[in-house]
Image (tube, helix red, strand yellow):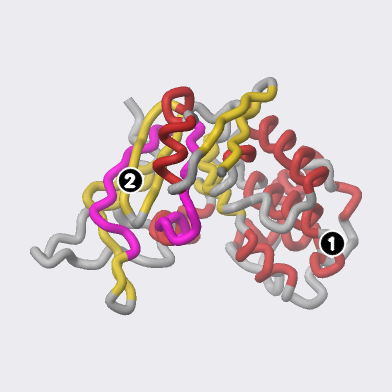
């Protein structure tokens, strides 16, 4: 049996005297599309940074740090990890948008070097082929030649997913991937993500919007106040009582075809 994509055991994170994650334990098997859902300030962003190795656990009063394993390993070279776990978020997009003169194709190919731009890196033909294939797969090959800074939010988001997919990663971590998208662009973007989910890449979607949870996602992790409130099947957790508890407001759940919506009163 293969190791889980993510295994976290009794992990805490504190910054500036404030506890951001408090004894969190969860397992996300590879191959199981999962959404991590919670309000702003629930610990979602901290959990993402823990997974991407931007931060590390802090010791508990008893001196325990807990354990975080990604694909079965506690220690990773970040560059090596990026080839297995692609990361897409508004923060990543902001970094690329601010890189003056960064062309779309170069932005995708430079992902092989964990860089923003090619500089003196040697690009092989297989890398170029993989970049073109990924851009075509995301429907943005026509943007080759454009600067990243000139793209719309939706266009740039697709290019960054192409950058992540060019490595042929085993999993994709999507942190609030629809942030800044208008409703029409968001729906088209989500349909593209459905295709990625069906291709065999494991998706971990971090969001506070129920309507962004793809039909292909079968499992939810609910965070509240830095703790796991619930961890289980989507069908069991996308209910009025559970969401009312999560958001602290009366929630009514509505299903529209394959999608779920929630109204908070």
Q: Residue at x 80, y 46 (%)?
A: 185
Label whose residue precedes the other's in the sequence (1 or 2): 1
Q: Is 139 or 257 nearer to us in this picture? A: 257
Determine whether, in the image, residue 66 is placed left or right of residue 27.
left
Magenta region includes residue 185: no
The residue stretch that appears in magenta: 20-45
Q: For residue 187, what is the image quadrant?
A: top right
Quadrant of the rendering where the N terminus is positioned: top left
Q: For residue 255, what is the image quadrant?
A: top right
Magenta region includes residue 30: yes
Residue picked out by circle 1:
151
* Place of residue 43 in the rendered image (x, y in percent of width and height, measured from the top left): 40, 57
Report whether residue 170 is seen. no
Q: Is residue 71 above or below residue 100?
A: above
Tag of residue 31: none
Determine whether, in the image, residue 201 is placed left or right of residue 138.
left
Residue picked out by circle 2:
228
Q: Residue at x 27, y 45 (%)?
A: 25
Q: Nearer the viewer, mark 1 or mark 2?
A: 2
How far, Cα to Cα, is label 1 from label 2? 37 Å
Q: Is residue 19 above or below residue 38?
A: below
Q: Is 71 or 119 nearer to us in this picture? A: 71
* Place of residue 41 in the rendered image (x, y in percent of width and height, measured from the top left): 44, 61
Q: Residue at x 31, y 72 (%)?
A: 18
Report whether residue 240 is seen. yes
Determine whether, in the image, residue 108 is placed left or right of residue 12.
right
Q: Residue at x 67, y 37 (%)?
A: 193
Dot 1 and dot 2 residues touching (CB under 8 Å) = no
Determine whether, in the image, residue 222 is placed left or right of residue 252.
left
């Amino acid at each position: 049996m293969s190791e889980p994509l993510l295994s976290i055991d009794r992990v805490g994170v504190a910054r500036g005297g404030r506890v951001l994650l408090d004894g969190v334990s969860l397992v996300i098997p590879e191959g199981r599309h999962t959404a991590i859902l919670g309000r702003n300030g629930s610990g979602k962003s901290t959990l993402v940074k823990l997974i991407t190795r931007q931060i590390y656990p802090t010791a508990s009063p008893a001196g325990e740090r807990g354990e975080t394993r990604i694909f079965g390993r506690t220690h990773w070279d970040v560059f090596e990890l990026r080839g297995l776990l692609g990361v897409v978020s508004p923060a990543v997009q902001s970094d690329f948008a601010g890189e003056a003169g960064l062309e779309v194709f170069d932005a995708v190919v430079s992902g092989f070097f964990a860089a923003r731009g090619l500089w003196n890196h040697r690009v092989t033909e297989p890398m170029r082929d993989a970049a073109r294939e990924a851009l075509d797969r995301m429907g943005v090959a026509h943007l080759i030649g454009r600067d990243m800074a000139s793209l719309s939010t939706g266009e740039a988001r697709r290019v960054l997913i192409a950058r992540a997919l060019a490595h042929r990663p085993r999993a994709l971590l999507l942190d609030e991937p629809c942030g800044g998208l208008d409703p029409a662009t968001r729906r088209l973007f989500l349909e593209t993500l459905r295709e990625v989910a069906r291709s065999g890449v494991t998706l971990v979607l971090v969001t506070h919007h129920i309507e962004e949870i793809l039909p292909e996602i079968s499992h939810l992790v609910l965070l509240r106040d830095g703790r796991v409130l619930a961890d289980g099947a989507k069908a069991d957790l996308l209910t009025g009582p559970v969401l009312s508890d999560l958001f602290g407001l009366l929630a009514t759940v509505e299903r529209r075809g394959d999608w779920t919506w929630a109204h908070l009163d």
